[in-house]
Image (spheres, helix red, strand yellow):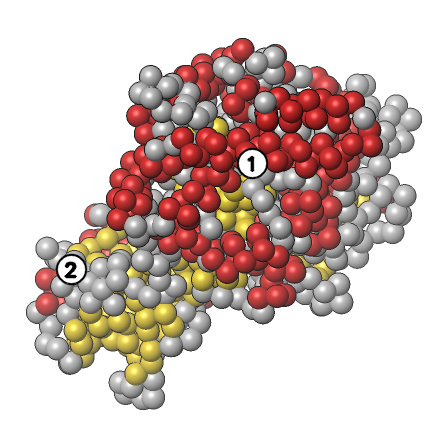
Amino acid sequence: MKNLAISTALALCFALSACNNTTESAGESAIETRASEILAQMTLEEKIGQVIQADIAAVTPEDLKTYNLGSVLNGGNSAPGGGKVAPPEEWIALADAFWIASTDTSDGGVGIPAIWGTDAVHGHNNLQAATIFPHNSGLGAANDPELMKEIGRITAKEIRATGIDWTFAPTLAVARDDRWGRAYESYSENPDLVAAYAEAMVLGLQGDQNSEGFLKGENVMATAKHFIGDGGTQLGIDKGDTVGDEAELIKMHGAGYGPAIDAGVQSVMASFSSINGEKMHGSKRLLTDVLRGEMGFEGFVVGDWNGHAEVPGCTATDCPKALEAGIDMYMAPDSWKGLYKSLLAQAKSGEISANVLDRAVERILRAKLRSGLFEAGLPSNRTTANPNMLGTKAHGDVAQRAVRQSLVLLKNNDSVLPLSPNQNILVTGSGADSMEQQTGGWTLNWQGDGNPNNIFHTGETIFAGIKAAMTDGNTVLSEDGSYERKPDVAVVVFGEEPYAEYRGDRSDVVFEFDEGENLALLKKYKAEGIPVVSVFLTGRPLWVNAHINTSDAFVVAWLPGTEGEGIADVLVGDASGNPRHDFTGRLSFSWPANGTGEPIHNPDDPAVQWPFGYGLSYYDATNLKPLHENPGLASAADNFNGKFIERGDAAKPFSFYLGDSSNLNTPAETLVSTSLGGAVSTRGVDYKAQEDAREITWSGNGLGSAYIRSRRAINMATLGAPKTLAVNVTWRVDEMPQDPFNVAMECGDGCSGEVDLTSTISKLKRDEWHTTEIPVACFIKNGLNPSEVKTALKLSSSSKGRITIHAAEIGTATHTNCPS
């Protein structure tokens, strides 16, 4: 009778416009009551399952049935069937399988439906047929919250078309350092713009929380991420540490969360990063006191990909600290089974209190109830599950408009733009006919790489868009930049190659130095008297002064997504030579006057070339004067003289870092430094002079590393044939590590050569200085690419130990014997 009375009250209120507040109150009361009733019926095992999310590549429907997991996700590299991509029908079929498994009650359980989350961060970007919008840095340049709401609505509709309920978007990072590899996931460096977009995107994805369709039908659950400070880390290091006054950091980096919460966002994702040394996944102060107590968030907090493992004292399969801090759902993609076992044991022993576990489960249940998940039924039976809704013309038209509005014009000397549709146009450059380059990371896979044009079922390349717009002219694509007939104008499309997360981290923002191939191509056309229009594909501002100087027009196109025709809409004029669309995009980030990458936000700062909000239109006729071409730093090749470490510190062009499971890349900017998790620390000691050596101490608290890394890759061949070289290290063993002591040289993610030096250093007399020769050939033998060395020397151990280092440099090898 109680439920019937509530239902009657709800029906009456929906019929009366003056009853909104009463309806919301009654509806939430009913949800709370039902959540409590479900919770009371759940076994301890079911509760543990609800707080765990597993990746579809590491979990089966049978697992869901057995362990009662609360959620699944498809990571950036996960698609149904185990391949890179899959047709929408397979996504729906797998959604059905997970639904059936999770709602099964044959074992006497409650049968709570699992919710599927996906990284739909610029459209439903794992689907070949989906509409892929510009990445967020480009959308920020459009400065149009209503457009964001429409993009959110379309994205939700396409997510629902494949049977999925939840997206890990929007990203509300306020990126303050362009060196960060996720800067393109940020709408802007400006917190006010991020705040305006947060509300708009949440409303677009979820619907209005005062409406009957909130979270239901064509709407999906949204996620505000990554709480908090992900865009402010030191040196722009992904997963790094954001340092400063806590109140000021919350004001800056929390700007988008208040509007998102007010709009009813149901989930918040914790950041990998830390605030003043405290990892977010373990911060009760920020996840509970600030997010819930001060900001009023009432949904549930989900972790990031094994992010709990980076909390000091935790591993991927054992971390009660995260639950206690305020993580309600662990994202344990491949570690879920071990985590389930440890959480269950800890709940049984009382290490995790029943109140803490119940609180997390109830928050998840409430969100599922609000979204109508219990009543939604089999995904394939829902009216929204319709593959034909992917990549429709109407959706593509909105994406094309978003591209138009995001374009920023920085130069248009002598009004070379707009192009006339009857001109002879040469289109060239790495991005001219590349869906992969224009869509960027988080497209079809995590890094967005390895995507040929024919894998996309929607959109068109930038060249195809220009060709279609040149109705009366001749448009030629040149892959190598050559031509048979001299063109009237060369349109050169170039920029960043795809990347995502830490793989996009940079030590500076110089796009390329004087020897760069793109600059050489621009200079070639300039020397031949051909007007040049540069279209720059980038996720962030980069120093390109020489490229701008060599171009007659320069357009920042960001990462525009699948609808390349949107660029032609603005670049190509009508039959009379007049613009069809003006440039309305304005910089969402300050543009640098040098290449150092130091954060720039003050428009009066001489390091700012153009401030936030800058951009030309077709009606700004002033020619741009030549810009200076000094990037403010030398290339790594110019700096490298064979020395790695001098007087205990990193030699140019290297910098010292410490790493452990809590943060792999903690800058060791002073001699006295400690890794975030405390696995390794350093201090200055005396050898021949005051503090001319660095003592490195391993605490035995997990794997720790001390290493030097260059801004740019080093080619060892500049010093001679790599296999004839050796690394000579002058050091002292003070306390011998018991576990393997490894020395490595690295050439990028997944590219390294490592040598076990345990036997070698065990023979060195303690407390005496020695010079050890390690042939470079040993590193090459174990996987090093000597032409792309980024980490020149990395010392790693898991056990207690202490070694003091004075110098390391490259010399000629006197032997080729590798340590055993």
Q: Which mark is residue 32?
A: 1
How many numbered marks have been drawn onto this rendered protein structure? Answer: 2
Which amino acid type corresponds to the residue marked 1 in the rendered image? Glu
Q: As rendered, which of 66 and 402 lies closer to the eye?
A: 66
Secondary structure type for disc 1: helix
Measuring 57% from the left and 52% from the top, which residue is drawn there? 292
Q: Which mark is residue 599?
A: none
Secondary structure type for disc 2: loop
- Residue of label 2: 739
Q: Position of residue 49 (x, y in %)?
A: 36, 34
Outermost residue to the front: 1
Q: Position of residue 371 (x, y in %)?
A: 58, 28
Q: Relative to residue 582, is residue 158 drawn left or right?
A: left
Q: Position of residue 53 (x, y in %)?
A: 41, 35
Q: Position of residue 360 (x, y in %)?
A: 45, 43
Quick check: can you spot residue 482?
no
Crowd band around label 1 with a 10 angstrom C-alpha radius: few (<14), some (14–19), many (20+) = some
Find the distance from the CA under tag 1 to the CA under tag 2: 53 Å
Image quadrant of residue 397? top right
Earlier-in-chain disc, 1 versus 2: 1
Measuring 39% from the left and 63% from the top, which residue is drawn there? 676
Measuring 26% from the left and 85% from the top, which residue is drawn there? 687
Measuring 12% from the left and 77% from the top, which residue is drawn there? 766
Quarter the N terminus occupies: top right
Crowd band around label 2 with a 10 angstrom C-alpha radius: few (<14), some (14–19), many (20+) = some
For residue 201, above or below residue 350: above
Q: Relative to residue 309, is residue 245 drawn left or right?
A: right
Which amino acid type corresponds to the residue marked 2 in the rendered image? Asp
Quick check: can you spot residue 126?
yes
